[in-house]
């Protein structure tokens, strides 16, 4: 009987709750306004021949490199950041190697690493989800081959200081350090340029969030020329499709769209956090396009009651250290109006309002 490898049989199934998503999408950290009109115009211009040809990634990598002030050999286009994570695991991990992951964080780091047979060591973030720099550095060993860090982190929105990340790269020269900057546009700090100076540092970006292109599955992995050359050996030349390749240059050109959207989201983030504070609801201060907050034992009922009001939020109570927590993605001002109004109704309905507080 055909059986998968033992490590694959032991992997936890990852089934994001994507079905039946009707209403305001505040559950998956997507762009709630859609993509740039320039991208839509390009999409409508594609013809049968565009879809019949195999994709050619290199010309678009050159465009991206120029935009980000990198060399083409320092940029690898990937099928979302998920593929970038997978490629790093396939390139640098063998059975028995160690992987360090601060938790809570993006689930795919553990899944792809564990699939190689590597040993995943989780390091719990601080009580307020502070970056656990001291404990991560203490856990580095000669067997450490990969450290994966989302910055800003998902699902908390907390950030790590650049100096801590660079110190970690220096402390583990035999390990690949992945800094996943999927939410960069809502934060503004990056290590892109540092990747060329440290051969073990990789920085990932996505077009799924601020650019509104989650459906096209496009990401970037930046690293030194030598390190990325190794990653390219295990990468499919055709993993990024022609539709994504045709649209990415137009998405890049329209930086006014991205900047405007990100600015609105950051303003709405502060608005939601101020509202949560007024309601005396604990939350993690965020630098991303979402806010994680605590509703306690009523977390599942809270999510269901929000869905009944056609507002989708994500239950994160199973993440390490996130017991009773829910995450809400920010949208445009009128969408935040809808989100906050629904939350106020649900807090009252579930009896979660502290004495003397009126949602």
Image: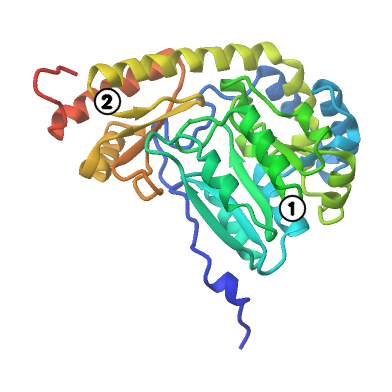
Q: Which residue is mark 1?
A: 87
Q: Residue at x 70, y 59 (%)?
A: 142
Compared to residue 223, the image places residue 343 above or below, namely above
Q: Quadrant of the N terminus?
A: bottom right
Sequence-first disc among 2 and 1: 1
Q: Residues within 10 Å of mark 1 (few under 14, many from 20)?
A: many
Q: Is residue 277 left or right of residue 95?
A: left
Residue on which disc 2 sits: 342
| Residue 152 at x, y percent in the picture | 55, 31
Q: Quadrant of residue 270?
A: top left
User: Can you see residue 53?
Assistant: no
Left or right of 340: which side holds 164? right
- Marks 2, 1: nearer the viewer: 1
Residue 274: x, y in percent?
Answer: 33, 15
**Where does the image place residue 68, in percent across and percent down from the top left?**
79, 23
> Hey, which quadrant is residue 242 in on the image?
top right
Seen in the picture, residue 285 relative to 5 is either above or below; the reply is above
Mark 2–mark 1 CB contact (< 8 Å): no
Answer whether residue 74 is visible to the viewer in this image.
yes
Q: Residue at x 50, y 33 (%)?
A: 29
Q: Residue at x 77, y 44 (%)?
A: 200
Residue placed most toward the observer, 125 or 21: 125
Instruction: Say what secondary structure mark 1 lies in.
Output: helix
Vertical position of residue 84 compared to residue 98: above or below? above
* Gap in angstroms between the C-alphas marked 2 and 1: 41 Å
Q: Of all residues shown, which one is farthest toward the bottom?
A: 1
């Amino acid at each position: 009987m055909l059986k998968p490898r033992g490590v694959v049989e032991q992997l936890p199934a990852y089934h994001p709750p994507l079905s039946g998503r009707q209403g305001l999408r505040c559950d998956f950290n997507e762009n709630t306004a859609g993509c740039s009109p320039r991208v839509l115009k390009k999409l409508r211009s594609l013809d049968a021949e565009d879809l019949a040809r195999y994709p050619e990634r290199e010309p678009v990598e050159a465009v991206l490199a120029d935009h980000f002030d990198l060399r083409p050999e320092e940029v690898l286009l990937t099928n979302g950041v998920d593929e970038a994570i997978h490629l790093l695991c396939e390139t640098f991990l063998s059975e028995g190697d160690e992987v360090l992951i601060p938790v809570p964080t993006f689930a795919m780091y553990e899944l792809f690493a564990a699939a190689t047979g590597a040993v995943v060591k989780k390091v719990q973030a601080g009580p307020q989800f502070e970056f656990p720099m001291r404990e991560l550095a203490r856990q580095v060993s000669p067997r450490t081959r990969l450290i994966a860090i989302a910055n800003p982190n998902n699902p908390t929105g907390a950030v790590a200081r650049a100096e801590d990340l660079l110190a970690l790269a220096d402390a583990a020269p035999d390990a690949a350090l992945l800094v996943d900057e999927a939410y960069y546009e809502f934060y503004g700090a990056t290590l892109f340029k540092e990747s060329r100076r440290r051969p073990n540092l990789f920085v990932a970006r996505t077009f799924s969030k601020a650019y509104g292109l989650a459906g096209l599955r496009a990401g970037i992995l930046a690293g030194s020329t030598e390190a990325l050359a190794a990653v390219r050996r295990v990468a499919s030349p055709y993993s990024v499709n022609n539709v994504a390749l045709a649209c990415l240059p137009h998405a890049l050109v329209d930086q006014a769209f991205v900047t405007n959207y990100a600015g609105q989201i950051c303003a709405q983030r502060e608005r939601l956090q101020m509202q949560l504070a007024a309601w005396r609801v604990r939350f993690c201060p965020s630098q991303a396009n979402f806010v994680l907050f605590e509703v306690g034992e009523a977390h599942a009922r809270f999510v269901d009651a929000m869905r009944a009001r056609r507002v989708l939020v994500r239950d994160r109570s199973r993440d390490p250290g996130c017991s009773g927590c829910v995450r809400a993605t920010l949208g445009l001002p009128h969408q935040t109006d809808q989100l906050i109004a629904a939350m106020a109704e649900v807090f009252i309905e579930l009896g979660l309002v502290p004495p003397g507080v009126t949602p």
